Amino acid sequence: MKSMTYKSPIGMITLIVEGDHLIGLYTEKHKAFKKVNINDNHKVFDKTIKWLDKYFSGKNSKMNVPIKLNGTDFRKKIWKILLEIPYGKTITYDDIAKQIEGLGNGRMSRRAVGGAIAHNPISIIVPCHRVLGVGNKLVGYSGGLEIKKHLLNLEGSDYQ
């Protein structure tokens, strides 16, 4: 595993690569954040930094960073839905719960969805910040609500 830090408009971000895939992207306030002092070199870091630079300049660029999501099958289903949320758009925890139910997984609670989203290992690229509460209310974000607001404002998203 290799790691490095990236200075962004929302603070330091830790990037983690395993093999040829990005497996972690954590803001400082993310509850799974682990401070690293090593700044390794890797081609995946180069791609990720280019993508992040475009993103933070307000551009919706195609995601070309090779990612690998490590987690339970349930969490991977949730994270796959997150990857389908377009730039500048939002959905609710309830919307995701209904999508999961539609896949034949039985009744799904917003709380279970929120728990899976909170464990998203590649924030921003896997856009968990685009998920809102009932009535498009700004709720829950492992990196803190101020960062979620910043990201949603950058994308021009509507929320309350």
Image (cartoon, grey):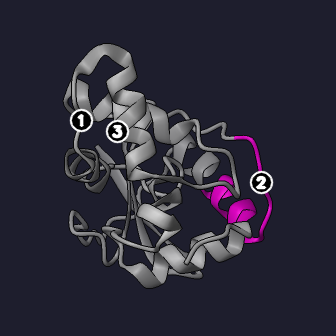
**Residue 44: where, in percent of width, then height?**
54, 42
Image quadrant of residue 76? top left
Amino acid, disc 3:
Ala
Give the labeled residue for mark 3: 97
Q: Is residue 56 left or right of residue 139?
A: right
Q: Is residue 149 above or below residue 44?
A: below
**Residue 157: where, in percent of width, then height?**
68, 67
Q: Is residue 77 left or right of residue 81?
A: left
Q: Is residue 76 left or right of residue 112?
A: right
Q: Residue at x 59, y 72 (%)?
A: 159
Q: Is residue 121 visible?
A: yes
Amino acid, disc 2:
Asn
Label 1 vs label 2: CA separation?
32 Å
**Residues drawn in magenta:** 49-62
Q: Residue at x 53, y 33 (%)?
A: 66
Give the labeled residue for mark 1: 108
Q: Which mark is residue 60?
A: 2
Helix, strand or loop for disc 3: helix
Sequence order check, earlier mark of 2 and 3:
2
Dot 3 and dot 1 residues touching (CB under 8 Å): yes
Q: Residue at x 74, y 70 (%)?
A: 156
Label 2 vs label 3: CA separation?
27 Å
Of residue 132 and residue 152, the one placed in the foreground of this image is 132
Badge 1: residue crowd in 10 Å (few <14, some 14–19, many ≥20): some
Badge 3: residue crowd in 10 Å (few <14, some 14–19, many ≥20): many
